[in-house]
């Protein structure tokens, strides 16, 4: 965000970590020790930010405590309070304090987790906080949407940070985590930062010049929105010979994304079709659920096919023009 020209106000309870982050910024940020478990501290931090910087355009709620695997009977009220107050209440308090200062076009990004999408044994309290972030984000998106304020959440999987449970436990635990990731490695903080910058709108040139393309899907590293390296886009192009005629990298990326998303829609439609057939066989068909989803998936797939046809026609036309120009005698 700093590299994109944003003026930052950084708040953290850990002074050493705060100072280290501040050193990475291109411009000197506003730095303040903040315990997000205290709603009063959150309000003071937001007020001092507005007083120093004039306004707030972006809110990034990323304060959190990583969990320890514990049976629920082994947890304490103190452990509950620590996770809930930091992971969930902190996001609530900062957001509540910031809303009066946000103008149309502002954006909020909250950090949930892959554990906010799926449960795990021994992590009931952490699951509760991260599922809570997802629900809170969805509700705030509806509440603030009419004010032209965007609210999103990211749900990282295993990220290589000092507080990651696997990193803390040691190399063997890290290997076990990496084995659960299709890309065979943990994600990096920089990859998460790319996603956040994109959601804030600070990465408008991302597709043209940077290394990351955002695909809205759960993929290799467990993000809801995951960066895919541009050099891998050629793999998308290989799916359809049509795309090989597209020389512009941004067009290749867009077309590749259409192929990937269209394929997902077709797959979704087939799965829904199978479920509808099974429900009809059992006499428990639910048209308001499966039927609507099937129609929606089919419609998206048809739209995708039409878009690809347009791309193919444009590519063929461009290729024909080039061939015609090549046939023309060279003027001296």
Image: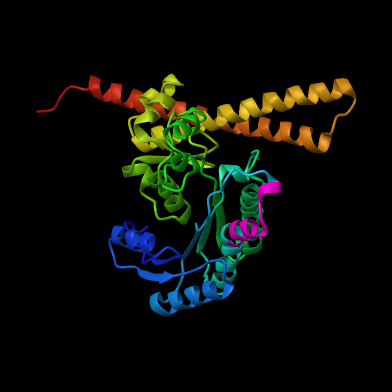
Whether 95 is among the magenta residues is no
Q: Quadrant of the N terminus?
A: bottom left
Residue at 45% in and 77% down: 48
Front residue of this view, candidates 79 and 115: 79
Taking depth in this image into account, of 60 and 252 the one nearest to the observer is: 60
Tell which residue pokes out farthest to the front in this image. 74
Residue lying at 39% horizontally and 32% vertically, measured from the top left: 252
Location of the C terminus by quadrant is top left
Chain part drawn in magenta = 73-85
Q: Is residue 13 above or below residue 194?
A: below
Figure check: 144 above or below 245: below
191 lies left or right of 300 = left
The answer to whether one can see residue 202 in this image is yes
The picture places residue 37, in percent across and down from the top left corner, at 57, 66
Front one among 227 and 298: 227
Residue 80 painted magenta: yes
Left or right: 188 in relation to 136:
left
Percent across and percent down for residue 254 are 44, 36
Q: Quadrant of residue 255?
A: top left
């Amino acid at each position: 965000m700093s590299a994109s020209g944003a003026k930052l106000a950084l708040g953290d309870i850990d002074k050493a970590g705060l100072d280290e982050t501040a050193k990475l910024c291109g411009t000197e940020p506003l730095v303040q020790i903040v315990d997000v478990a205290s709603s009063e501290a959150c309000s003071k931090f937001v007020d001092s930010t507005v007083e120093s910087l004039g306004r707030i355009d972006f809110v990034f709620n990323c304060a959190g405590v990583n969990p320890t695997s514990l049976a629920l009977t082994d947890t304490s009220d103190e452990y509950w309070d620590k996770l809930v107050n930091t992971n969930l209440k902190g996001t609530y308090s900062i957001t509540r304090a910031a809303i009066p200062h946000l103008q149309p076009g502002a954006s909020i990004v909250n950090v949930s987790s892959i554990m906010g999408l799926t449960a795990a044994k021994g992590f009931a309290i952490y699951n509760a906080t991260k599922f809570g972030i997802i629900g809170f984000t969805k509700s705030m998106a509806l509440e603030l949407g009419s004010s032209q304020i965007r609210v999103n959440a990211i749900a990282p999987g295993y990220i290589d940070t000092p507080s990651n449970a696997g990193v803390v436990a040691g190399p063997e635990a890290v290997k076990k985590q990496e084995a659960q990731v299709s890309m065979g490695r943990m994600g990096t903080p920089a990859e998460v930062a790319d996603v956040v910058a994109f959601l804030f709108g600070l990465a408008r040139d991302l597709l043209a010049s940077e290394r990351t393309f955002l695909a809205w899907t759960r993929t290799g590293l467990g993000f809801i929105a995951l960066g895919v390296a541009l050099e891998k886009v050629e793999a998308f192009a290989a799916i359809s010979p049509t795309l090989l005629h597209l020389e512009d990298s941004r067009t290749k990326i867009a077309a590749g994304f259409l192929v990937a998303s269209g394929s997902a829609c077709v797959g979704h439609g087939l799965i829904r079709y199978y479920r509808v057939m099974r429900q009809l066989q059992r006499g428990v068909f639910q048209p308001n659920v499966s039927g609507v989803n099937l129609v929606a998936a089919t419609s998206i797939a048809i739209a995708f096919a039409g878009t690809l046809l347009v791309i193919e026609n444009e590519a063929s036309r461009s290729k024909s023009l080039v061939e015609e120009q090549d046939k023309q005698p060279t003027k001296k």
